[in-house]
Image: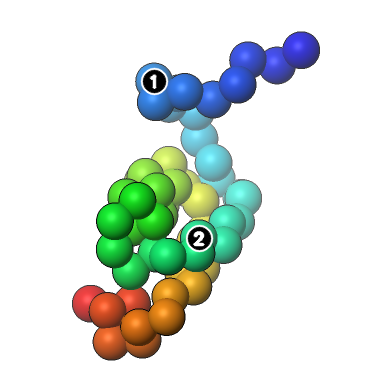
Amino acid sequence: MPTPPTSHTTGSLDGLSALVTGGSRGLGLLIADQLVRRGCAVTLAARDERRAHS
């Protein structure tokens, strides 16, 4: 069985994509940032369009 990902996982996510809800602030923003840093293509879903673009 594969090891579940942890905060110490550093593997590449190149070629993968993710939809992050609540991505304009808080945990959603932090998660989106980490996914992008690891090479994942990220689409944000947010209620506040103005915050999503900042």
Residue 20: image tag: 2
Query: As displayed, is residue 18 above or below residue 49?
Result: above
Residue contact between numbered discs 1 and 2, judged by CB atoms under 8 Å: no
Residue 22 is labelled as none
Please report the residue visible at 39 percent of the width from the left and 48 percent of the height from the top.
31
Q: List x then y, in percent, for residue 5.
A: 54, 25
Q: Mark 1 is on which residue type?
A: His
CA gap between label 1 and label 2 equals 20 Å
The residue lying toward the viewer, choosing from 29 and 42, is 29
Residue 40 or 32: which is nearer the viewer? 32
Residue 14: image quadrant is top right
Whether residue 54 is visible here, answered yes or no, is: yes
Question: Dot 1 corresponds to which residue?
Answer: 8
Give how far across and how far down residue 21 sits, in percent.
50, 64
- Which residue is at 43% across, 42% downward? 38
Tell me if I can see residue 53 in this picture: no
